[in-house]
Amino acid sequence: MSFSLTRHKSVAVVALAMTLLVTLSACGSKPAASQQKLVRTANLSANFVIPTLDISKSRGFDQAGNMFDSLFYLNREHKVVPALATKSTVSKDGKTYTFTIRKGATFSNGDPITAQSFVYSWQRSLKPSTKSLHPYIFKGIKNAMAVNAGKLPVSKLGVKATDSHTFVVTLDHPIAYFNKLMTYQAFSPQDKKIVDKYGKDYGTTPDKVVFSGPYNMTKWKPQGTTWTFVKNNKYWDKDKVKMHKINMFYEVDPQTSLNLYQAKKLDFTILTSDQFKNFKHSHQLYTGPYSYMNYLIYNQGIKNTELNKAFNNVNIRKAISLTIDRKQIVNDLLNGSGLEPTGVVTRYLGYNAKNQDFAKLQAGGDSVRYDTTLAKSYWKKGLSQLHMKSLTFSLMTSTGDTSSKLAELIKANAEKQLPGLTIKLQNVPDQIAYQRSTEGQFEAYLGGRGADIADPIEFLEPMLSTNPQNYGAWKNKTYDKLINDSTTDNLSATDRWQKLLKAEKLLSDDQALTPLYQNYNYYLKRSNLHGITHNTTGAQWNYKYMYMTK
C-alpha cells in the first residue's frame, strides 16, 4: 500500500475473482506455450521506478512478485495456492497457523530457504531500526505492534521455526483474510547471511540481494528508469517460467512510451487517460481494474498555526470537497478511464457473505458529493468559526500530466465557488512529492492509496492515528476503536463488516481525506504476448506465466 498519484471505464459485471486477479490474454483458444515457437525476450513499460530491492524498506511492491515469492501465491486461475509453503494447517481457534516450507527451495544464490528465513525476515521488518513503511500489515500477529514500537524484543514476535521446514505463526486473534495476506511480498523470506554481509548497502544493487521468485534483477539502480528481469534458474517452479529476459522501461513522459510501442520497440505499454481515448476500439487494448483511490489530503498536523486551524475545521474541508465534480474528473479529465468514488474504499475490492460490494454499502455522503450551494454554506460557517475572511494554501502534486491537470481543475472550481480562497499549485517530481508527504512537509497533497489485499481494511487501517501512512495526521479516538475492534475482537464476519462500515462513515462524515477517483488501468500489448498477470491488489504485475510467440 502506498501513496502517490498515478494514471477506468465503468464495468457492468465484475466477478468476485476480479478483485483478486486479472490475467491479460487474447480472446479465443490458442495452442499451449509448449506447442509453439517462443520468443524468450520481451520489452515492457513499467508503472513506477523501483526505489529499493530491500522488501523490509520498500515503498510499494508493484513489480515485487517477479522477484520474491511468499508462502502462498495468486495463480492465473485467481486462486490462493502454495508457493514457498507446500501446505498449512490452522488451529480450531483460528489463531495458530503451521506452514510446511517447500523442501529444496533456494534463494537465487543457492542458499536454502527455510522456516528460519521467514522468522528472520518478519522480525527484521518489524525491528524499529529498520524503519519499515509497512509494519501495520503485520498487525494481528502476536506482539507485532509492541515489537515495532520497541516495547518488546523481536524474539517475542509470534513466529517460530520448530525445524527447518516448519514455520509456526501465532495470532492475537483470527484474521479472516490471513491466507490472502500470505501471498504478499512483504512476508517473503530473506537470507540473513546476505543481509549481514552487505549491511546498509543491502538491496541497493542487484548483486547485494538474493531473490526467491521467478526472476532475478539485473541492470538496475535505485530510482533507475531501466532494468532487466532474467530467469531465476534456482527458482522452485522454474519450469513454468518461459521468458529468459524481460527488459523494463519507465518513461517519465508516457507519450515516449507510446511512441516506443508504436515503433515496435516495446511489446507492452500502459496508457494514460489522454492516450486511452485514441485506442478505445483497438484489438491491442486490454483492461484491468486496480484497487487504487486518489485523494486530496490536508496536513492537519502542520505547524503553521493558521493552516492548522483551517485544516482541522471540518466545514472548511467539506466546503472544498463539495466544489469537486467527480463526474467531470472521470468524463472530461480522464476521458472515461476512471471510476467515480462512492466513498473512501474502492469498488470491486471486498464482498460480504451476500456478495455485496463494500463500496456500494459505504456511506460516502458529502465526501463524494458535488453541491456548490452547500459548499458555500460550509465555507461561510467555517470562516466564521475561524474568524477569518480568506484562506491561502499550497497544493502539492507530482509533475505528471494527469496530476497537474487535476490540481488545476480542483483549484479553478474551488476558487470560483469559495470567496477568499487561494490555492497555490506546487508541482514536484513524484519521488520528491512522496518523500515530502511521508515527512509531513506539505500543506495539502494530491496522493493515492492502493490495496495490498482484497479487504476494505486496506483503506481504513492506514487512517489510524498511529499509522505511519496517515500522512495527514487526522486523529479520532472513536475511529481508532472501531478499526482496532474490527481486527482484535473475535467478531463474526457480519459484525466485523458493520464495524468497518461505521468506520468508513465516520471518515466520510469528518472528511478525513477527500476521495477524487478510482483508477481503472488500460494497456496496449502485442497479440503474440500472452500470460501477463495483473493483480488488482498488492504486487500489480507478475510475469511468471508470461510467454511470447513468434
Image (spheres, grey):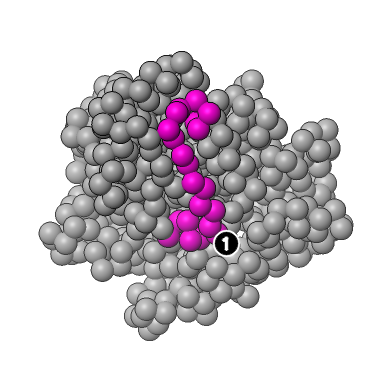
Residue 494 visible within the image? yes
In x, y percent, where is residue 300? 30, 43
Residue 352 visible within the image? no
Q: Tell me which residue sits at (28%, 26%) in the image.
A: 384
Q: Does the magenta run of residues contain 432?
A: yes
Quick one: SS at disc 1? loop
In x, y percent, where is residue 512? 34, 34
According to the image, label 1 marks what residue? Answer: 49
Q: Tell me which residue sits at (35%, 75%) in the image.
A: 192
Q: In which quarter of the view is residue 239 placed?
A: bottom right
Q: Does the magenta run of residues contain 427?
A: yes
* Magenta-highlighted residues: 414-435
383 relative position to 436: left or right = left
In the image, 108 versus 58, the foreground residue is 58
Quadrant where the C terminus sits is bottom right
Whether 189 is drawn above or below 134: the answer is: below
In the image, 371 versus 498, the foreground residue is 371
**Residue lying farthest to the front in this orientation:** 389
In x, y percent, where is residue 368? 46, 24
Q: Amino acid at mark 1?
A: Val
Q: Tell me which residue sits at (59%, 54%) in the image.
A: 399
In x, y percent, where is residue 460? 34, 36
Q: Tell me which residue sits at (59%, 46%) in the image.
A: 404
362 relative position to 218: left or right = left
